[in-house]
Amino acid sequence: MKAPPAVRIAATTSLAIVVVSITTIAAAMQFSPWGAAVNVESLAGTSNEFNTPYLDGCPIQAPDGLSFYMASNRPGGMGGLDIWAAHRATEDGPWGAPQNLGAPVNSGADDFCPTPVRGDGLFFVSARAGGCGGPDIYFSRLNPTHGWSTPANLGCEVNSPAGEASPSFFEAGEEAVLYFSSTTPGGFTPDSGPTGDSDIYASILGGDGAFGPAALVPGLNTAAEDARPNVRKDGLEIVFDSTRPGTLGGPDIYSAVRATVFDAWSIPVNLGTLVNTSSSESRASLSWDGLILFFGSNRPGSELTDGVTPSNDIYFTSREKITGSG
């Protein structure tokens, strides 16, 4: 598939992997530690419809900070999980009630893991018919007059007969890369079974505007579930959820850094008890400035699905940039 014009960019032909240097650690020192996570509805003035007693997850803020995308199976959708977006007037204002994006982005199948990019583009995942097997990664663009374009499947070199999730696209210099997770068999653990466990992959955008074959990302994967990555806009930090040994219970949010886009990723670090809990935390994403981390969690305090069981709600934590860094 040819990538939409605004996504095209000349790119290198391989991901260079080098020995981790001490400068890689410096990339993590640009920011203070993450603070205690809170529910997004704790922001004064935010709609009490932002989270619901249903599944609300896959959260991500648009690059301009004025729109917020999520996946939800709340009432009013088109079937299964749909993609919804909330809006606000200013970058520090409260969020309004999420609105369903409607067709052609949403369908009667599950549509989830939205990732907005500059130029009003949207990567997302859909289980609609006509793909490469399981849920696939698609791209659509918003036209102010005509609405969302017909979603284009990224093709079967990126997508697999298994399931893909959480596309994350970044451009840094000559590097233009799509990160995502996939349960395709034969990944980090080739003998994991017919469905495979979830691993993190990357696909490089070529000079012809097409994404190349997906490849495992060195240093991030384990024999456990490693899923739903999101890369900071400069390509120097990645967050994802994992069930690897050392979690606090369910999937936890981990992060890794690097000094340049040609360096290897550092050893992933669990973000700790101010972010993670003994419940499940998933699909973390970074704001455009890297100062806010959003994620989904079914921790106590989330809206109740049946009066007893916490639903999956959207939470966030923040940090500060250290003066003089960057």
Image (cartoon, helix red, strand yellow):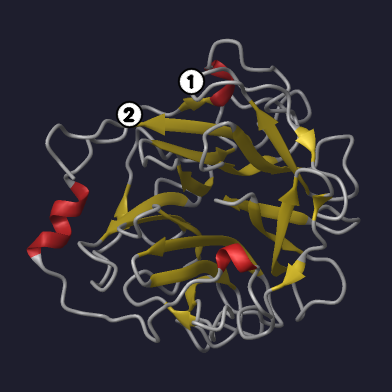
Position of the C terminus by quadrant:
top left
Residue 105 on image: x %, y % = 80, 54
Q: Nearer the viewer, residue 238 or 270?
A: 238
Q: Earlier in the sequence, mark 1 or mark 2?
A: 2
Residue 194 on image: x %, y % = 66, 85
Residue lying at the far left in this picture: please name it.
Answer: 22
Q: Residues within 10 Å of mark 1 (few under 14, many from 20)?
A: few
Q: Residues within 10 Å of mark 2 (few under 14, many from 20)?
A: some
* Mark-to-mark CA distance, 1 and 2: 18 Å
Name which quarter of the figure residue 325 lies in.
Answer: top left
Q: Residue at x 28, y 81 (%)?
A: 16
Which SS class for mark 1?
A: loop
Position of the N terminus by quadrant:
bottom right
Any mark on residue 122, and which? Answer: none
Q: Depth-wise, is mark 1 or mark 2 nearer the camera? A: 1
Drawn side of residue 44 relative to residue 32, left or right: right
Residue 282 on image: x %, y % = 53, 48
Name which quarter of the figure residue 273 lies in.
Answer: top left
Drawn side of residue 186 relative to residue 318, left or right: right
Residue lying at the far front in this picture: please name it.
Answer: 145
Tell me which amino acid carries mark 1: Asp
Q: Residue at x 71, y 56 (%)?
A: 141
Residue assigned mark 2:
35
Residue assigned mark 1:
92
Q: Residue at x 48, y 74 (%)?
A: 201
Residue 55 on image: x %, y % = 72, 40
**Residue 221 in view, yes or no:** no
Tell me which amino acid carries mark 2: Gly
